[in-house]
Image: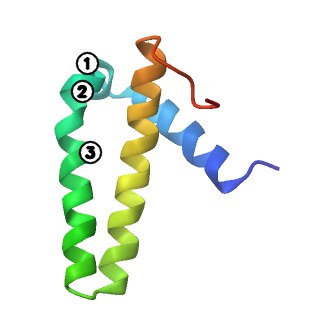
Amino acid sequence: MKSAFENLVHLNHHIGKECAWCRKQTVESFCQYLLEEAKEVQEAIQQNDADEFREELGDLLWNVVFMTRLAEKQGLFTMEE
């Protein structure tokens, strides 16, 4: 049985392969989206909104996994590293 993280990585990889927009992204082009999600996490913390905090952390984690896949694609490092 796969862990929740392994399932997340698998789903992220699958969607990334199927989506034309995702296939065009690079670490450099996607960086702005990662930063936007981090700011949304910060806003949820400042608003003391636990539900929003949880949701935004999920979005941020999704983007971190996606960014790591982009780094793999560019030969920078691997998910395992």
Instruction: Please give the residue where the numbered disc 1 appears in the rendered image.
Output: 24
Mark 1: which amino acid?
A: Lys
Picture residue at 26% right of the left edge, 57% below the top: 38
Instruction: Please give the residue where the numbered disc 2 appears in the rendered image.
Output: 21
Find numbered disc 1 in the image and state the secondary structure of the residue it sits on. Answer: helix
Q: Relative to the observer, which residue lies in front, 19 or 9?
A: 9
Front of the two marks 3 and 1: 3
Find numbered disc 3 in the image and state the secondary structure of the residue it sits on. Answer: helix
Mark 3: which amino acid?
A: Leu
Instruction: Please give the residue where the numbered disc 3 appears in the rendered image.
Output: 34
- Does residue 6 appear to the left or right of 69 in the view shown? right
Crowding around mark 2 (Cα neighbors within 10 Å: few <14, some 14 to 19, many 20+) is: few
Picture residue at 27% right of the left edge, 78% below the top: 45
Picture residue at 21% right of the left edge, 81% below the top: 46
Upstream in sequence: badge 2 or badge 3: 2
Q: Position of residue 67 (x, y in %)?
A: 38, 34
The quadrant holding residue 44 is: bottom left
Q: Position of residue 79 (x, y in %)?
A: 58, 31
The answer to whether 59 is drawn above or below residue 75 in the figure is below
Crowding around mark 1 (Cα neighbors within 10 Å: few <14, some 14 to 19, many 20+) is: few
Find numbered disc 2 in the image and state the secondary structure of the residue it sits on. Answer: helix
- Alpha carbon of mark 3 to alpha carbon of mark 1: how far? 16 Å
